[in-house]
Amino acid sequence: AQSVAQPEDQVNVAEGNPLTVKCTYSVSGNPYLFWYVQYPNRGLQFLLKYITGDNLVKGSYGFEAEFNKSQTSFHLKKPSALVSDSALYFCAVRDDGNNNDMRFGAGTRLTVKP
Amino acid sequence: DGGITQSPKYLFRKEGQNVTLSCEQNLNHDAMYWYRQDPGQGLRLIYYSQIVNDFQKGDIAEGYSVSREKKESFPLTVTSAQKNPTAFYLCASSRGGMGSYEQYFGPGTRLTVT
């Protein structure tokens, strides 16, 4: 079965600095990979996804993610962090051979300090 | 959260009572999902439905029940058999239950059982 790991519970960055939120995955087939963001007491909002093609995926609010098949990673990045980026970020994976099942990571709390 | 509504936002119940959480979507999506979110555990799938009048158990279906009588609606009942019902419940939908479709989430219902 597919799984996803977010190795950092918490990431702290200063406003204006680049940010990275890490995600690694495990699938038996080819992965469909997703990033979501959650603000306090709200539902999750879709940021971006990787299906196939270019390994660098661009999404909402200036976020991007790089798919690395050899390292089975899909790290979320942003060149210049904003205080308003502070939120809980979830990585998710679906195996193209087991389409019914999407697995979410435990989440990484990003704090951007002014 | 656009297109998916969950009500109520906060719900309080006494132990031993069944309670039904509402989820409605106007996105014309075929697939709908219920997740439970607990601190530090990410999202865990309770039930999902790919089409009307059909639904499947997720990882933690015990103590929960659902129905899918209309495409737009996927209510979740938390029964008295659920041993630890206090949690944040999220409903989601997607164009299809398979493949590369991202999920769209409602704002969530926070259930507290005392």
Image: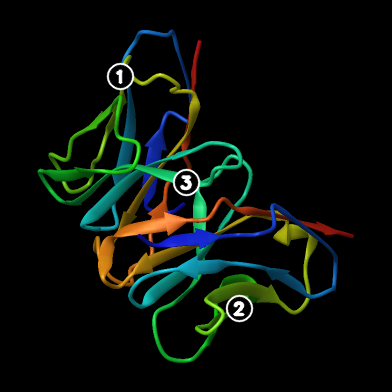
Q: Nearer the viewer, mark 3 or mark 2?
A: 3
Task: Give me the disc on residue B43.
Answer: 3
Residue B95 visible in the current orientation? no
Q: Which residue is painted at 52% across and 88% down in the image?
A: A55
Check whether the beta carbons of the residues at disc 3 and disc 1 lie within 8 A of each other.
no
Looking at the image, is B99 positioned above or below residue B31?
below
Residue B2 x, y percent position in the rendering:
43, 54
Looking at the image, is A85 positioned above or below residue A76?
above
Q: Is residue A36 left or right of residue B103?
A: right
Q: Amino acid at mark 3?
A: Leu
Residue A3 sits in which quadrant? bottom left
Task: Give me the disc on residue B79.
Answer: 1
Indicate the secondary structure of the residue bearing disc 1. Answer: loop
Residue B86 visible in the current orientation? yes
Indicate the secondary structure of the residue bearing disc 2. Answer: strand
Residue A23 sits in which quadrant? bottom right
Q: Is residue A34 left or right of residue A88?
A: left
Q: Which residue is painted at 20% across and 45% down in the image?
A: B56
Q: Dot 2 corresponds to which residue?
A: A64
Residue A59 x, y percent position in the rendering:
55, 76
Residue A66 sits in which quadrant? bottom right
- Report how far apart the C-alphas of labels 1 and 2 lie in the structure: 41 Å
| Same chain letter for marks 3 and 2 | no
Q: Which residue is painted at 24% across and 55% down in the image?
A: B31
Q: Nearer the viewer, residue B73 or B87?
A: B87
Q: Amino acid at mark 1?
A: Thr
- Toward the bottom, the furthest residue is A54
Within 10 Å of the Cα at label 3, are there few (<14), some (14-19), or many (20+) other Cα atoms?
many
Q: Amino acid at mark 2?
A: Glu
